[in-house]
Image: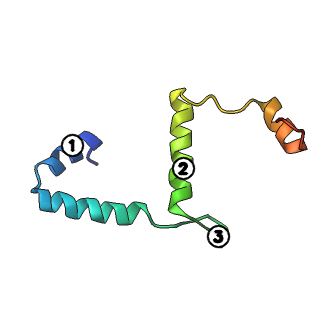
Amino acid sequence: MLAFEEVLSLVQRLPIEEQVRLLHRLSQMIYQPVEVEGDDEAIPPEEIAESEAAWQEYLSGRDLGLSSDLIKRQLSGENLG
């Protein structure tokens, strides 16, 4: 299997028209609703993208998340305002 950098290098060698065609095809693949295993529900691609972005922010340390105490207070309906 080719690594990301190898694929990127190959793509950069394509004529611009082929790069645009590839971009269109990839975006069609990425932005398809995903079916949740064992459910009849589909998750919209926007929600998947938001979730992935939030996860990456957390992993990078740019978003520290919420403390368990804050989550407990929110779930109990405690007025935090």
Q: Where 27 falls versus 79 (above or below)?
A: below
Do the CB atoms of the residues marked 1 and 2 lie less than 8 Å apart?
no
Q: Residue at x 56, y 41 (%)?
A: 54
Q: Is 58 situated left or right of 32 in this image?
A: right
- Residue for badge 2: 50
* Label 3 or label 1, whichever comes before in sequence order: 1
Q: Amino acid at mark 3?
A: Glu
- Residue for badge 3: 41
- Residue for badge 1: 6
Q: Amino acid at mark 2?
A: Glu
What distance separates the C-alpha of mark 3 from that of mark 2? 18 Å
Do the CB atoms of the residues marked 3 and 1 lie less than 8 Å apart?
no
Q: Where 65 falls versus 36 (above or below)?
A: above
Report crowding for label 2: few under 14, some 14 to 19, many 20 or more residues within 10 A (C-alpha).
few
Q: Residue at x 18, y 51 (%)?
A: 11
Residue sitting farthest toward the front: 81
Q: Is 39 situated left or right of 47 in this image?
A: right
Q: Amino acid at mark 1?
A: Glu
In the rendering, at what x and y percent does residue 4 appear? 29, 43
Q: Is 51 situated left or right of 24 in this image?
A: right
Image quadrant in which you'd find residue 19: bottom left
Residue sitting farthest toward the bottom: 40
Instruction: Label 3, secondary structure: give it.
Output: loop
Q: Residue at x 90, y 39 (%)?
A: 78
